[in-house]
Image (tube, rainbow, N blue to C red):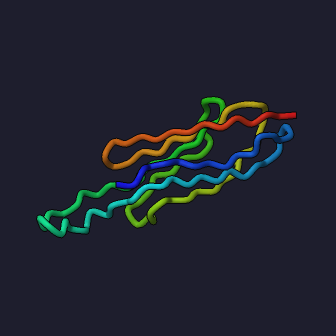
Amino acid sequence: MAKIKPRVKVPKKADAGEVVTIKTLISHPMESGQRKEKKTGETIPQDIVNYFSASFNGETFFEVEVDPAVSTNPYLEFTLKVPESGTVSFLWKTDNDGEFTDEKKIKVG
């Protein structure tokens, strides 16, 4: 199985009140639940990234529930109006109870 690795791009600096673009990508193989094991014929269980959230200084500002039609290695891009220096935290959840996190700091000034 491929290594699951979240990647995020957040500006290191911003002005107070500036709207910044945040980009995220997680390397995840995404099983649809419709393929079968070649040797056994058993269905491979669904395992997708089904939830993502982003928070700034502990307050969630972006979240999404993901449907099975999402592609492998899902990419999300969104914006944040930066009120002050702080930490942007990211959380991805999968069907098999996997949780992956990352954090980036933004400095105002």
Q: Position of residue 46 (x, y in %)?
A: 29, 58
In the picture, which quadrant includes the C terminus? top right
Above or below 50: residue 91: above
Residue at (82%, 41%) from the top-left corner?
Answer: 14
Residue at (13%, 67%) from the top-left corner?
Answer: 41
Residue at (25%, 68%) from the top-left corner?
Answer: 35
Q: Position of residue 90 (x, y in %)?
A: 56, 41
As drawn, the residue found furthest toward the left would be 40
Query: Which quarter of the picture shows residue 56?
Result: top right
In the picture, which quadrant includes the N terminus? bottom left
Q: Position of residue 57 (x, y in %)?
A: 65, 30
Query: Which quarter of the picture shows residue 11?
Result: top right
Residue at (58%, 49%) from the top-left corner?
Answer: 7
Query: Which quarter of the picture shows residue 12?
Result: top right
Nearest the eye: 88 or 26: 26
Q: Position of residue 88 (x, y in %)?
A: 65, 37
Nearest the eye: 53 or 10: 10
How many badges with numbers are in the image? Answer: 0
